[in-house]
Structure formats: C-alpha cells, structure tokens
Amino acid sequence: MKLKTKLKIGLGVIFVLGVASVLFWLSTVDYEIKNDKIDSIETLKIIESKYLADRDEVWQMLLDNYGIQRTEDRYITMKEIEDAEKKLGVTNCDLLGIAIKESSLNQFDNGDSGYSWGVYQINSYYHDISERTAYMVDSASDWTYANLISNGYPASRVYAIAKHNGSINKQAVQAYAFRVLLVAERICSLK
C-alpha cells in the first residue's frame, strides 16, 4: 500500500474517533452540568458554614460531602489564598472561587490523569509549570492570576476564568466560569 493511501486511512480513522469523542462529550454535558450545580450548592453551604458556623460542623460537612478528614490544612489554604488576593489586589474573591471549585481547597490535589496539580488544578499538559509552583499556594496564586490577566482579566472576567478551565467553546467550561463567579461572589458577601 502506498504511503499516501496509508496516510488517508490513518487520517480517516482519527477523524472518526474525533467525531465519536465529540458525540460522547455532548451526551454527557447535561449530566455534568446538573451534577456540578448540585456540587456548587453543597460547596456554598460549606463555605457559608466555614464563616458562620462552629468549626466542628464545617469539618463534619466536609467529611460527609467530600470524604475530607478533619485537618487545619484547608483552613490554612483558604487563608493563604486570601493573603495572595490582597497582595495581588484581587478584591472579588475569584482566586478563592477557582480554588474551591477546582480542588475543594486541597493544596495537594492531583487530577486529569496526573496532569493537573495543586489547589487551582493547573494542567501541566497545556501549561509550562513546575510541580513545585503548582503545589505551593502562593506561587500557584501568582501563576493563576498572571494567567487570568493574560486572558483579559478583569475586563473579560468570565472569559479569563473559563480559559483557566479549558476551551471557551465548550458549554461545560462556560458553565464552570459562572459557577466560580457564584461561589466567589457568595464568599465576598460573607466577609
């Protein structure tokens, strides 16, 4: 078989697999959005409790909703992000909203088959970032803020936050940005 024919067959197979992947993704978008909306409501309740309720209740909710054992790590992580927001001049709690949505304030979270690291789940496949930078809250906050700025933040707030999560053309990514904003605005209203 000639090289040109093999190349055409290979590209055809890749195209078919790509179309199948897109169709599968479209069939799961509604399911993901519905689950994420539920997750956002639970996250908001946890954050409200963190500010308004007794600490024992907060940790019990974290255990019940996320399987997170009682530690002070997440409280410290929240404080570090708030400090970074002050240093960077972020007044709308967007970094904290991203961290809550991405990792439930888990500084050492690891996702996307090992490619996304830290409290902001910075994807090393798409971004040139070291593990150390991604896992350290202060440097990850600096990196995330610079990434938001490079995508038009704060003038294009929704777009920049959506780009943090992936391709702006995906409905789920756009919904992600609005969920982050919802969490961020709720947190700021409690301060």
Image: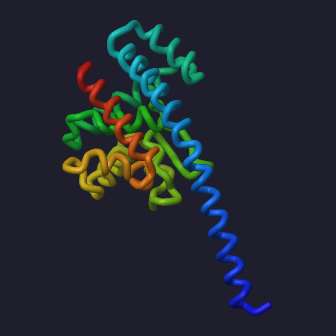
Q: Is residue 44 left or right of residue 1?
A: left
Task: Please tell me which residue lies in front, 114 or 159.
Answer: 159
Quarter occupied by the N terminus: bottom right
**Residue 175, percent from left and from top:** 40, 40
Point 31% across, 50% down: residue = 159
Point 33% across, 11% down: residue = 52
How many marks the image carries: the answer is: 0
Q: Is residue 121 left or right of residue 183?
A: right
For the view shown, which residue lies furthest in the bottom direction?
A: 2
Q: Is residue 91 left or right of residue 108?
A: left
**Residue 71, percent from left and from top:** 51, 20
**Residue 39, percent from left and from top:** 48, 27
Residue 140 lies, with reference to residue 104, above or below; the image says below
Q: Is residue 138 left or right of residue 130?
A: left
**Residue 67, percent from left and from top:** 59, 22
Residue 111 lies, with reference to residue 40, above or below; the image says below
Task: Please tell me which residue lies in front, 34 or 67.
Answer: 34
Point 26% across, 38% down: residue = 85
Task: Please tell me which residue lies in front, 191 or 88.
Answer: 191
Point 38% across, 34% down: residue = 179
Q: How is the image coloured?
A: rainbow
